[in-house]
Amino acid sequence: MAGNQRRQRRNEKSRSQPVRKNGSRDVDPFEYGEALSWRNQSYMNDIADRCAPSPHPLSMCQSRAAAFGYPCEEYKVTTEDGYILSLKRIPHGPHDSNTSTEMRPPVLLFHGLMVDGATWVMSTPKQSLGFILADNGFDVWIANSRGTNSSRNHTSLSTKDPAYWEWSWDELASYDLPAVLQFAYDHTGEKIHYIGHSLGTLMILAAFSEHKLLDVVRSAVLLCPIAYLSRTKSKLLKLAAHIFLAETVHWLGFYEFNPVGPVAHEVLSQICGDPEINCYDLFSAVAGPDCCLNTSTFCAFLEHAPQSTSVRNLVHLSQLVRNGGVSRFDYGNAKDNMKHYNQPRPPPYNLSSIPNHVPIFLTHGGEDYLGDVPDTRHLLRTLVKKHNSDSIEVIYVPDYAHADFIMAYNAPELIYGPMVDFFKRH
């Protein structure tokens, strides 16, 4: 099935042509507002007609969990640097006779870039990881990082203050991640199984490399991990990084990056003139052509995404693309780096120092542009040096791109089932 869809998609792409006006010249896509689309058109051309992206007025608990009868609790967690995060909890399934959480292993799910925790419950109960875990006896906690729709409050700052947005994934790893993990640990009294997707994997790898959070984490699942990014297959990301596009936006005085706002429109107008970059489908241009999403799931996704991140976060990710390693944020000059790190260059995260006693379940896909195969194999070589075969498990899905790992219709069979078995062994 997936292979047929892949061939169909490639045939459709080979027939696609640039938009033309009067048959005489290529149209500037931004002139007519047709090309800047976050809709994924991987193998269903009518998605755009069947669901226009619009924010859902209700929270994840109301819009997704309650719709299927799942209990859902909402907590507020304040980080050490003052950000107030929304943390959701699905303590059990809707049909469990025993609703106690005492015998339920806790698991925390952390989302990726420009999305929030709703990504874990986008589909039906039989297809959404958050629901599947609850139905399989787990106490499910779902994090939402600073800047996302439900985590935009701060003890003293407003989102209109530039200082609110002065953070990158360094701060997500140093503040957001420990805050929500510690909160779940304190409430359950048990170590947490951790699941991260995309940026959520980079955060836990950074923490582990500094031997942090090891006392509260029981195991770690890395869904299409990103760490090394220098060989990304995304031409859009490569070009943006090498022309210092995010840095330019920051220098111009912009601090919040709203993917559907006017700043994003201007940013993308600088790179969408390149004929090798497909701005008619930005999801695929950034993350790779998924194989296995259905219309209803992606429509639900568009009700909750894409969401804001900080421009500084994009600057930091661009540094990873250019520099090849995994280091803390580079302030751009020796003086500022000395001020923050007491050394002229930002210190690296030494991923080879991650202890081998934390069991790791890692998945990656052949069509993933972000967690591309060469970079992921580099990460694996780094991790395998420390881990033996009993403590690390790897699944490779040739047809999967970045979004498939959290929304594909066949992910329960290919990924989630083996993941649950992994948790039960550890």
Image (cartoon, helix red, strand yellow):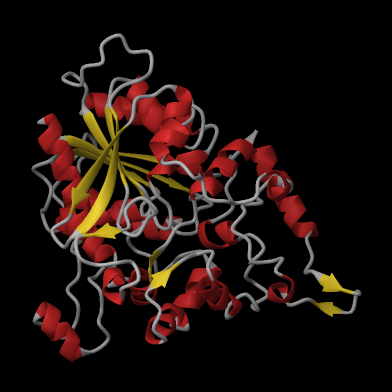
Classify the position of the C terminus by image quarter.
Answer: top left
Give left or right: position of 75 versus 254.
left
Q: Is residue 225 above or below residue 194?
A: below
Q: Depth check: give the residue in front, 396 or 417.
A: 417
Residue at the spot x=24%, y=49% of the render? 384
Q: Which image quarter: residue 284?
A: bottom right
Residue at the spot x=53%, y=38% of the render? 408
Q: Depth check: give the residue in front, 172 or 363.
A: 172
Looking at the rendered structure, the number of numbered marks drawn on it comes to 0
Q: Which image quarter: residue 320?
A: bottom left
Picture coordinates of residue 425, whole percent (x, y): 23, 25
Picture coordinates of residue 229, whole percent (x, y): 39, 65
Can residue 24 be seen here? The reply is: yes
Picture coordinates of residue 223, whole percent (x, y): 37, 45
Q: Depth check: give the residue in front, 288 or 170.
A: 170
Give left or right: position of 267 versus 183.
right
Give left or right: position of 45 versus 358.
right
Classify the position of the N terminus by image quarter.
Answer: top right
Q: Is residue 323 above or below residue 2?
A: below
Can residue 397 be seen here? The reply is: no
Q: Which image quarter: residue 189?
A: top left
Residue at the spot x=58%, y=61% of the render? 282
Residue at the spot x=50%, y=59% of the render? 369
Q: Is residue 324 above or below residue 200?
A: below
Outermost residue, top side: 97
